[in-house]
Amino acid sequence: MPNRKSAKKELRKRVTNTAYNKKIKDNVKGLIKKSLKAIDAKDKEVKETVAKTLKALDKAAQKGVMKKNTRNRRKSRLAKKLNKLSAEK
């Protein structure tokens, strides 16, 4: 338990920021799963779903929730699978 006033404030901030980051990460993970399912199912709205996921990844990296390289890796993998789907048609 923190003793100083500043340490107590930092603890409060950390709890708030952790909750904020977790919400964003959970949202991104859910969108990635939804996109992968849509790609596997060859859904009609797959491009819209992937576009929404890419936007969420960009926002998460912009907010500092995830690193840019992580964002780029995930975007690349999604795009690769989407392009593979497009090539099959």
Image: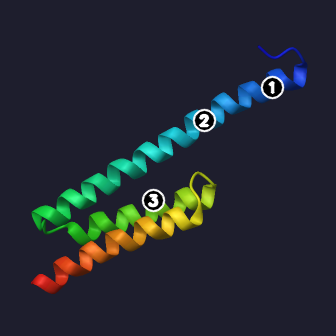
**What is the spatial separation of the Cα atoms under label 3 and label 1, in whole angstroms?**
30 Å
Q: Quadrant of residue 8?
A: top right
Disc 2 to disc 3, C-alpha distance: 18 Å
Q: Secondary structure at mark 3?
A: helix
Q: Earlier in the sequence, mark 2 or mark 3?
A: 2
Give the residue number, with chain letter if any, for mark 1: 9
Which residue type does callout 2 highlight?
Thr
- Residue 18 — which label? 2
Q: Is residue 28 above or below residue 79?
A: above
Mark nearest the camera among 2 and 3 is: 2
The secondary element bearing badge 1 is classed as: helix
Q: What residue appears at the point 42 percent right and 43 percent down from the top-left corner?
A: 26
Q: Which mark is residue 56?
A: 3
- Give the vertical position of 36 relative to 3 (above or below): below
At label 3, counting other C-alpha atoms closer than 10 Å, the crowd grade (few under 14, some 14-19, many 20 or more) is: many
Give the camera-side residue of 85 and 43. 85
Give the image quarter of residue 45. bottom left
Q: Amino acid at mark 3?
A: Ala
In the foreground, 62 or 4: 4
Mark 3 vs mark 1: which is more N-terminal?
1
Q: Is residue 1 left or right of residue 54?
A: right
Query: 86 above or below 63?
Result: below
CA–CA distance in space, label 1 to label 2 = 14 Å
**Side (left or right) of 5 relative to 65:** right
**Contact between labelled residues 2 and 1, with CB atoms less than 8 Å apart:** no
